[in-house]
Amino acid sequence: MSYVQRDFSTALSSKDVAEFYRAIRRFVMIVIFAAPLDSFYQYMQELLSLEWRAWMSEYLLSSYFSNRAYFDLKMDGKVDNPDQRICEDVYSFVKNSVEIIALFSGKFLSVIGFAGVLWTIAPELVYFLVVYATFGTLVTVKGFGGRLTSLKFKALQREAEFRYSLVRVRDNVESIAFYGGESHEAATTKDFLVSMVENVRELIVWNRHLSLFNNIYEFSMIIVPSIIVAPRYFSGQVQFGVISQTGYAFHKILAALSVIVFKFDSISGLAVQTERLEALLSALETHTGDVRVMKRYFGRTSASLGLAADEDREDISLLNISGPVPTGNIKREVGPGLIMRDVSIIPPNSQCVLYHDLNLQLSFGESLLVMGPSGCGKSSLLRAVAGLWSRGTGSIQSPLSSDTFFLPQKPYMPLGSLRDQLLFPSNANVCSYSSDSDLHEALKEVALDGLPARFGGLDAVHDWSDTLSSGEQQRLAFARLFLHCPKVAFLDEASSALDAGNEARLYAILSKKLATYVSVGHRTALVKHHTYVLEFKDDRSWSLCTRDVFGIPS
Ligand SMILES: Nc1ncnc2c1ncn2[C@@H]1O[C@H](COP(=O)(O)OP(=O)(O)OP(=O)(O)O)[C@@H](O)[C@H]1O
């Protein structure tokens, strides 16, 4: 292009018609090659971004869902908004990376291509450009780098918080409407908006400073090549076209060497996105490390399973020893039934021991009801058994997670059809053992046999958590449990929204279908469906007894 431009200018100034049309022909030839090449270049960049994003998101999602990392990240609270990092930061990261890689390689070729041209015309301009670009880069990085990067980091964080505040409102519309909490929610979301806007305002001011510096840096160079080459043109050393060729080459090299100065916005954005993704990756990798440790651990304990199962069964004890806050983790073992030895539980981010040295043993065919005042740690017991909480002391032996099933107080309703609700957490594609008649039978057991007709069949898709009442959701969760038929079930106030009749009926079916289960509940009517009762007291003490203590014969 630069050579064609030179020939154009020279042909025009010397009124050389033949040379002028020759230059036009060459120009057309260049365009025929350059235009498709440029489009293909764009296309390849977009394709590469897409492939990279798909791969990276898939990798992050696999890590996020393995070893319950999503749960631990939330508990740690060290990595904010992982959802935004996986969705938007990955997108911006790959897009910026591909653009910057392409930009740097393009600029590198520019320098190689044009440095030769400029060197043959005015070598002093090449030296000058190197010094000038180094100065510009240093000023940009030192003067603007730190502040712009930290402002961009905050901008992403605050935008995520603002959006999350609105997502929370959408997820809790009914409760907010009942409370009439609109003004509170409006104030909260506006606070997030204000904080985001304040940050962006500062960012804009800094961008204005940077843009001012860029303009001074760039505009002050516009006439430099002409000033250097013009005396040679006046003295007849070079032709007229060389002046525009020098200008073209000079500005190409200036743009290439000053790529950090001119593209600092994208580069600092990339730095921020990289930092956020790096933090997410290291947090996830910590959990992958845990997986390896846990695999080793479970490998060893499974080998000694027989031993654990053959141990003398301890009598149900009424141990209740208080003591200092223990450190470390509760040991986990795999075995039939449920055995807890000297278990003390500490909630995450807390120094408070919920209870000390809990001992109990539940064999196949036995069930346990956990009772006690609100906040005493009943659900925490199930969290510890499920491995969600691990801080504390003692050991818990329970069956493999594939043989257990937990019913939380508020059932989770995944996106999907009624069939998906019933088969959750199994997937409809893999869970081929449950035929339609099994699903209808399970619905009948929980008195929800009218649901398919009401909503358009088993494959009807609805927002089930908004469509079904709390009691219906709890009954649907019982149907899930009956379909999965685990070796041991854990129910955390799973019937709290049900009337006494439905609760009694479901527990009667449960005790027929499942040999071993542990329930958390407040109602004494539940006692008759369980072998033992574990009762927590206000003073953090506990007692374990058989149900005949409550006047119900064993
Ligand atoms: N994620 C958490 N981080 C820190 N403390 C927690 C966390 N979750 C629960 N706790 C605390 O642990 C204690 C026991 O909670 P838990 O949910 O086990 O009570 P509970 O006996 O089941 O209560 P309820 O009958 O009201 O459901 C409470 O004081 C609670 O505030």
Image: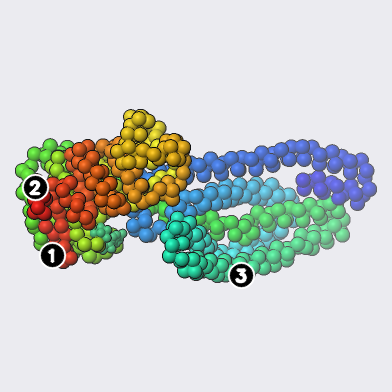
Residue 203 image position (x, y, % from top left): 58, 67
Whether residue 299 is visible: no
Residue 247 image position (x, y, % from top left): 77, 56
Residue 71 image position (x, y, % from top left): 35, 52
Whether residue 516 is visible: yes
Residue 494 image position (x, y, % from top left): 28, 50
Q: Residues within 10 Å of mark 1 (few under 14, many from 20)?
A: few
Residue under the point 55% across and 42% down: 50
Quick check: 187 above or below 80?
below
Q: Quadrant of residue 544?
A: bottom left
Of residues 360 and 479, the one nearer the viewer is 479
What is the three-letter code of the residue carrying label 2?
Answer: Pro
**Residue that badge 3 annotates:** 205
Does the residue tagged 1 have its C-beta within 8 Å of any atom of ligand 1? no
- Left or right: 320 as drawn, with respect to 454: left
**Residue that badge 2 annotates:** 553
Of residues 88 and 101, the one nearer the viewer is 88
What is the three-letter code of the residue carrying label 1?
Answer: Gly
| Front label number (3 vs 2) | 2
- Left or right: 54 as drawn, with respect to 515: right
What is the three-letter code of the residue carrying label 3?
Answer: Val
**Residue that badge 1 annotates:** 323
- Label 2–label 1 contact, CB within 8 A: no
**For marks 3 and 2 on the same chain, the one whose residue lies earlier in the sequence:** 3
Numbered mark located on residue 370 in the image: none
Residue under the point 22% across and 52% down: 520
Q: CA distance from mark 3 to mark 2?
A: 77 Å
Q: Please, what secondary structure does the residue beneath circle 2 have?
A: loop
| Front label number (3 vs 1) | 1
**For marks 2 and 1 on the same chain, the one whose residue lies earlier in the sequence:** 1
Q: Please, what secondary structure does the residue beneath circle 3 have?
A: helix
